[in-house]
Image (spheres, grey):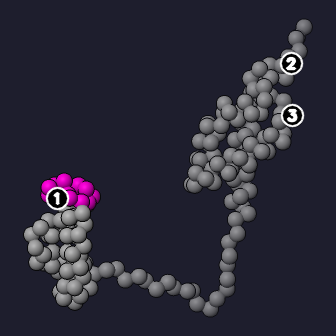
Amino acid sequence: MTTPVCTSASTAAVFPSFSSYVRDRGPVLLRTARSLTANPNDAEDLLQTALTKTYLAWERIEDHRALDGYVRRALVNTRTSQWRKRKVDEYVCEEIPELDPIPAPDPAEAQALRDAMWRAVLRLPARQRAMVVLRYYEDLSEAQTAEVLGVSVGTVKSAVSRALAKLREDPDLAVAA
């Protein structure tokens, strides 16, 4: 004689509610959704849609131990539907439109500009040159520059401001730019 197995009693202990299932299995299912999409935000939306479908069918699912398979199938089916619904616009035209190529900057011109900039920086007074180099070449903050040079932050600000004004007025930089 065989004993009948009551699946609803045994599965109620596994996941007593939909919210407990989502809480326990959500991170694993999100990883699955992320493997189906390139964008993490799209993966969250995909999982949300699949969980909505699962919630609507919660009472009809007999074996709650197989919920992961059900949700994974909902993820794949939803993703496939989204992919199929993707709209592709096609237009008939006489000629294929070609994009104008963006010209790459000439490395020689870039080097000439860097050389002109450095020559202009070398023409600055030693103190201003030191502050400009520390601020913009070494990428130190105003406070760090002041600490290195043993001056106040206000001194750094005013000296750098004067140095930049001189660089803006430098005739070699106007020609190079």
| Residue linked to disc 2 | 6
Q: What amino acid is at disc 2?
A: Cys
Sequence-first tag of 3 and 2: 2
- Residue 65 shown left or right of residue 57 in the figure: left
| Residue linked to disc 3 | 59
Disc 3 and disc 2 in contact, CB within 8 angstroms: no
Q: Residues within 10 Å of mark 3 (few under 14, many from 20)?
A: few
Residue occupying image coordinates x 84% and y 30%: 62
Tell us which disc is closer to us: 3 or 2: 3
- Residue 68 drawn at (x, y percent): 70, 35
Tell us which disc is closer to us: 1 or 3: 1
- Residue 18 shown left or right of residue 146 in the figure: right
Tell us which disc is closer to us: 1 or 2: 1
User: Whole-Å distance between the Cαs marked 3 and 2?
Assistant: 15 Å
Residue occupying image coordinates x 72% and y 40%: 71
User: Whole-Å distance between the Cαs marked 1 and 2?
Assistant: 82 Å
Quarter of the view holding residue 60: top right
Is 134 or 147 nearer to us in this picture?
147
Quarter of the view holding residue 154: bottom left
| Residue linked to disc 1 | 151
Q: Which residues are magenta?
A: 141-153
Looking at the figure, which quarter contains the C terminus?
bottom left
- Residue 21 drawn at (x, y percent): 72, 31
Q: Secondary structure at mark 2?
A: loop
Q: Secondary structure at mark 3?
A: loop
Residue 150 shown in magenta: yes
User: Whole-Å distance between the Cαs marked 1 and 3?
Assistant: 74 Å
Q: What amino acid is at disc 3?
A: Glu
Relative to residue 138, is residue 24 depicted above or below? above
